[in-house]
Amino acid sequence: MSFSNTIWAGTLTGKTKEVAHYQGNVKGPSVTGATANSIPAEIWFPTANTFCVVFNNRTSRASTPDGRDGILVYDAHLYDVVVGANPCPANPMLTYWTGTGTVDLAKKKLSGTAQTEVDDSPEMTVTASYSYKKAGSRETLTIQGMAVFPVQGLDLQGDGWKLNPGIVTFTGTFSKTANQVSVEGVKQGSLGF
Amino acid sequence: MIKAKFWIFTWMAVVSSCPFAQAQLADTIWSGNAKVTIPALVACDESGEALNYPKTTTGLTFILPVEVWFWDNSKFLIVYRQRDMGADPRRGALQPLIGEWTIPAAARKNQLSGVTEVPYGSDLYEIQTGSYRKSGSKYNFTAELRDTGDLTGYDSDTIFPNAKSVITGSFSLKGNTMNATLTAVSTPNPHGPGGIKTLGKSPSATVILTKTGRIPSSEGVDVFLDDPY
């Protein structure tokens, strides 16, 4: 099995320990133990050893009237890269994305960063382990890992919300689709990036 | 004769103790930090359909700074100390959460000149009630927040007839300390079709409140008003 040029669709579940409010740089009330369940996502593998995570706006907003038609969502942009390698550097809509995403086939691990051309450093780093299964024609990836947010900013008054610690642990299950990165990655506008 | 006077005195003391227990709550304000547990939440779109990014958010626990205003011997209001939740300092110090909002005349002080309605909800478009009564060694309470429909003449997008939230619970008193627990139930879309709703087990809260030196009749209701911009 090769990951090269494949797209996998599924859901992620992310768990936080504490989300705290700050005022004047002083920690205030917080929400503990919040878990976001079944976040629709896709894992794209541009090559055998690179990956990125992409939100498909049509899938994630499929329950909205706009989302059902696949229009008027995020100004008609279908995909958002969340973390990992640029899926198609040749696509002018993606030149801003400078994140990285590598697959360690031997250790079955994914490691990636989320960064754009205006960021001095990654906004998020992700490490995960994965396992692959094939049952009949159905191919499944199960992943487990953590996303780290190294810098969490507050506004100029020191107000805002922070993850404490700046970590989200996650699990996810994904199934291989018929879509290909080489086809989806070059799309622009209402049906692409 | 002395024995008879003793028993009469004792009887009067016993009888008077019941209303006295209620009277210590009338026109008082209690403050504390409620621990709120929400088992599951889901966001909805404008048609009321559940969104799926994420499908649900579960296991939320948070501290909500609150006050309980006992207007009189039977009516109360729960407010939250929104500045302690990070609200803009120009916002009112307090905001009504749920409970009686038909303000007794005695507490209708410090209202802005010329304003005849209290700020926030009113019987023009929603019902806000909150009542409590003694039951044995505890007090039981219930409060409701329900949209009635737009009677203001404005075609508001934020009024949803029959959207309703109800809390029920009990509290006990020990000196100037109050221990309370409550659960909340609501209609399928308590904040309208585009809002957030809970799923499954009802949200609940526990709180230890202490009596403050402030009283509703002198505090007035301007404390709920935002600063004019």
Image: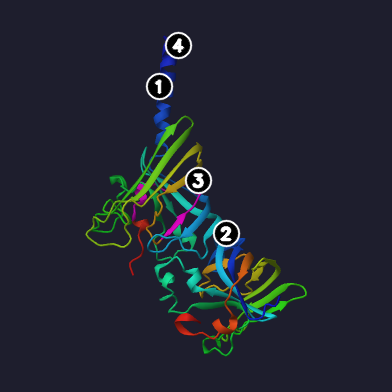
Q: Quadrant of residue B3?
A: top left
- What is the CA distance from the residue labelled 1 to the residue labelled 4? 14 Å
Q: Give the residue displayed 26% in from the left and 56% down from the top.
A: B150
The answer to which quarter of the image holds residue A5 is bottom right
Q: Secondary structure at mark 2?
A: loop
Label 1 Cα crowd, 10 Å radius (few <14 / some 14-19 / many 20+) = few
Q: CA distance from mark 4 to mark 3?
A: 42 Å
Label 1 and label 3: CA atoms lie apart by: 31 Å
Residue A131 in percent (x, y) is at 71, 67
- Image quarter hosting the N terminus of chain B: top left
Residue shown at 50% from the left, 42% from the top: B180
The quadrant holding residue A6 is bottom right
- Residue on which the image places disc 1: B12
- Residue A61 shows up from this direction: yes
**Camera-side mark, 4 or 3:** 3
Q: Nearer the viewer, mark 1 or mark 3?
A: 3
Residues at badges 4 and 2 in contact (C-beta under 8 Å)? no
- Chain of the residue where label 2 is placed in the rendered structure: A
Would you say residue A105 sits in the magenta stretch?
A: no
Amino acid found under the numbered disc labelled 1: Met
Badges 4 and 3, same chain: yes
How far apart marks 3 and 2 lie (CA) works out to 26 Å
The earlier-in-sequence mark between 1 and 3 is 1
Indicate the amino acid at tag 3.
Answer: Leu
Q: Confirm whether residue A123 shows in the render.
A: no
Q: Which mark is residue B3?
A: 4
At horizontal 40% and vertical 68% (from top left) the residue drawn is A65
What residue is shown with label 2? A34
Per the rendering, the mark at residue B209 is: 3
